[in-house]
Amino acid sequence: MTDCAICAFLAEHWKALAAATVALMFWGSVWHSYLFHVPWARAFCADKGVKDFRGIKMRFGILTCLLGSLVGSFAKATAILFVANTAPALFSPLPSCLTALYAVVPWLPARFAALFAAGLGIHFVQVVSIVPTAMWEQRPITLIILGLLYELSSLKLAAFVLAFLAQ
């Protein structure tokens, strides 16, 4: 039964998934509040046609947005671990760039490469599904690029956390 397999997967990996979810939530706050606050805020306000955030009518409250981010972070971590665990043949042999990574950073767990590759695959799906929608919605290119870079970096962070904590 699929439900039992999913429950077993979540029960086996809940600590690693929880840690990756917390890391992703933290990374999101660092990314948007400190690293890229100015270009992101400028593009966001321009997209809404206002000079600053006070002029933006928010459709969703902060708690709704935080809950959506929490669910999204958990889903990303779960997808990376699930893909890496259920399709190991996709990541063997490792691409030469990932093999070279182990020569430079030998302390990385062996599973990191498979989780990293799974994250890249998931990011590819995000790009081909998000970018056309953002273009049709006429989003500023700055928001599109910052969003894609954020997603890429967050998936790599999730792979890193999961490599240390997931069996």
Image (cartoon, rainbow, N blue to C red):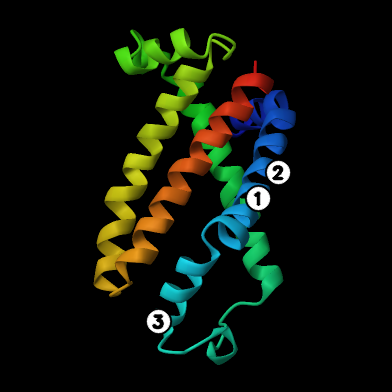
In this view of the protein, which residue sits in the foreground, 167 or 141? 141
Q: Which comes sooner in the sequence, label 3 or label 2? A: 2
Asked whether the beta carbons under mark 3 and mark 2 sit within 8 Å of each other, the answer is: no
Res 2 seen here: no
- Is residue 100 shown left or right of residue 51? left
Assign the N terminus to one quadrant of the image. top right
Q: Is residue 55 above or below residue 143?
A: below
- Residue 34 quadrant: bottom right
In this view of the protein, which residue sits in the foreground, 164 or 63? 164
Residue type (three-letter) at the residue carrying disc 1? Met
Residue type (three-letter) at the residue carrying disc 2? Val
Residue type (three-letter) at the residue carrying disc 3? Ala
Callout 3: few (<14), some (14-19), or many (20+) C-alpha neighbours within 10 Å? Answer: some
- Of badges 1 and 3, nearer the viewer stands 3
- Residue behind mark 3: 46
Asked whether the beta carbons under mark 1 and mark 2 sit within 8 Å of each other, the answer is: yes
Residue 44 x/y as whole percent: 45, 75
Q: Which comes sooner in the sequence, label 1 or label 3? A: 1
Residue 50: give its label: none
Mark 1 and mark 3: Cα distance apart in space: 26 Å
Assign the C terminus to one quadrant of the image. top right
Q: Is residue 27 above or below residue 60?
A: above
In this view of the protein, which residue sits in the foreground, 85 or 49? 49
- Residue behind mark 1: 25
Residue 47 x/y as whole percent: 39, 80
Task: Name the residue located 72 percent from the left edge and 31 percent from the top edge.
Answer: 14
- Residue behind mark 2: 22
Residue 140 x/y as whole percent: 32, 71
- Is residue 29 shown left or right of residue 150? right
Residue 28 x/y as whole percent: 60, 53
